[in-house]
Amino acid sequence: QEGTKVPSKRKQNTSIVTSDLLHKNLLKSEQKNWNNISPTYRAMTKRIKERLEELHNMYALSSGSPRMRFGENVYFEENGCIFLAKADDGEGNAEILFSVEDLGFSDAFIQRIRISPDQGYMAISLKSENSEEATCIIMKLGNLPVVEKVIPSVFSFEWAANDVLYYTTQKNLKCQNVFLTTFTYQKHTKLVYTEQDARFFVDLYCTKDRRFLTINSNSKTSSEVWLVDCRHPLESPVLVQARATGVIYHIEHRKDQLYILTTYGEPAEYKLMKAPVASSGKENWQLVHALEKKTKLVDFEMFTDECIMFLKNAGHLYLNVISFVSHSVQSIKLPTWACEFELESHPEHSTSTCYFQLSSPVHPPKRFAYSFKENNLIEQAVQEVPIITNCHTTRLLAKSKDETLVPITVFHNKNSKELHRRPLLVHVYGAYGIDLNMSFKEEKLMLIEEGWILAYCHVRGGGEQGLSWHRDGCQHNKLKGLHDLRACITLLHQRGFSQPSHTALAAASAGGVLAGALCNTDPALIRALVLQAPFVDVLNTMMKTHLPLTIEEQEEWGNPLEDERCMKYIKSYCPYQNIKPQCYPSVFITAYENDERISLTGILQYVQKLRKAALDHASRTSNKGNWMPNIILDVQANGTHCDSSWEHSLNE
């Protein structure tokens, strides 16, 4: 139109160039700062590294990787190789089917393995340290295994038949397309399904009896499943139940009945329901088993006449064994030291034993088996490994601001005297309904040996006490997670576990929101803060819809662009927005240059603003002996946001 000004392209480009330059300069100065400061820690680093390697060598071999059983055959992975052994033959005679190095993927690690039903093909995904996207390699098995096909940027994949593989592709952290590809007769690849809604992420699963392959499209709050009949794998998928707000569901199958794990109905927690395959709409779903209050469903495994639910309640782990024949439910408590489950792959649903591993941050994985026939739990003996007997596990409940009781798991050395003088490392996450990671880590065991106390705060926003625990700590309830964290640390000190001047707080990724917020509101509670790829600038990130995750993340943080109340609320707790001149704890942050999830610019600006605030405070209160916090940022050129290999985590 006449008279309207055309926005100058040059102006726009200038601002982009300026911010790029600012980013580069900030990064350079941080790298320089790190290079000056890191030599101070060299001797300590050397000592710690040597001890961690000792511990790793002691425990890594004994725990071994999970096994996949197919009749007589056992498949397993070790050190970047995939082996095949005979079940009765022992693993000493295993043959190598695949080696990462032989195929020239030396910096990659194996993420997922799927064997075709007749064991004629094997699909493997390989992921490198510097990318979130994996490469799928399909091997034709036989006397001499050969590479049949390589597919880039794959997320999940499953065999629908002996020679039909379904897979999803990943682009910009999103999975929206499903393809099928065939390997014999007329080889071809075709697009099967596309998800149009940016909030939804697509992955694949095969029911335990291999009757259906499921295409699962999930957002943070609802889901939709399509079935591919494995007897007719080239036919179009069939919808189970159209997506409905607040209804999440997953599908298993047994004897022409769909078994549905779902949040449908009251209360909105997981329950097991069933419906005939022919009429699968939710109006036909019948209740089989509901979980108790404040119970987290960790995993679920289907067998011929039973299913097992792996559950967590107030930090304790147990199994519910549900019989489809006698309709009985049996509850089995697991050892009190256990904090994490890992289910071993049971491709054959007709087996009479369920194998799994239990671990804790300070207990290496131990194999257990549940036998349906014997109806008991069997501890699997492996090579003799010194078991940690001098570590004490305590479970506490802290009363939050609104009287809610928040679980804490504490580990300390039984021989430690005067616990109030001991250093304490507190862990927090509290987002996305995800539990705090409590799997075994060599460095946690080392800290226990050296007299540290470890505490894990299971605050709201996480998933430790079921779906309502997450709902109570997301969107306009985010501050509850902060109140929970404050209550947990206060209780630990009251109970004689350390004191503020010996307390450090550790968090990664979205855990950085609560940890960074506490650092602003209660800096006197802790002496040090350790953050890994932290999310510290919630407001600015959620205002940028061009970023890959912003739209789907609105279900966790809210949408400040369209809701002013939400904008004000995020502003009230966002770590970056609430930095002010005060006495801060020391802060150590690790960030990654190639991180696709957390913007490095946001972290650089956070560190700069935090330093300035600490400096301002020090100059205002120029008392003698004033304590200045160390604020250190280590920007790693390699590595990404997600879990990495042992070598990489050791260096870190």
Image (spheres, rainbow, N blue to C red):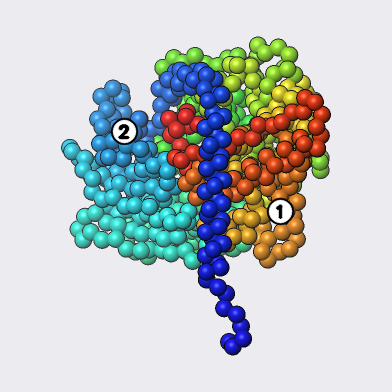
Q: Is residue 191 above or below residue 539?
A: below
Q: Comparing marks 1 and 2, which lies closer to the viewer?
A: 1
Q: Which of the 4 quarters of the picture holds residue 612?
A: top right
Residue type at tag 2:
Cys
Q: Is residue 536 left or right of residue 160?
A: right
The residue identified by callout 1 is 570
Residue placed at 75% from the left, 40% from the top? 616
Viewer can see residue 333:
yes
Picture coordinates of residue 82 (x, y %)?
31, 34
Amino acid type, residue under disc 1 in the picture: Ile
* Real-space CA distance between mark 1 and mark 2, rounded to the nearest whole angstrom: 47 Å
Is tag 1's residue or tag 2's residue first in the polypeptide sequence? 2
| Foreground residue among 106 and 87 | 106
Residue at 26 percent across and 50 percent down: it is 149
Q: Which residue is drawn at 52% across and 71% down?
A: 9
| Whether residue 355 can be seen here | no
How crowded pointer 2 is (Cα within 10 Å; few <14, some 14-19, many 20+) is rated as some
Say few, some or many: other residues with alpha carbon within 10 Å of mark 1 (under 14 / 14 to 19 / 20 or more).
many
Q: Name the residue under label 2.
A: 81
User: What secondary structure is marked by label 2?
Assistant: strand
Residue 515 percent across, percent down from the top left: 68, 39
Secondary-structure class at tag 1: helix
Name the quarter where the N terminus is drawn. bottom right
Which corner quadrant of the image does residue 582 belong to? top right
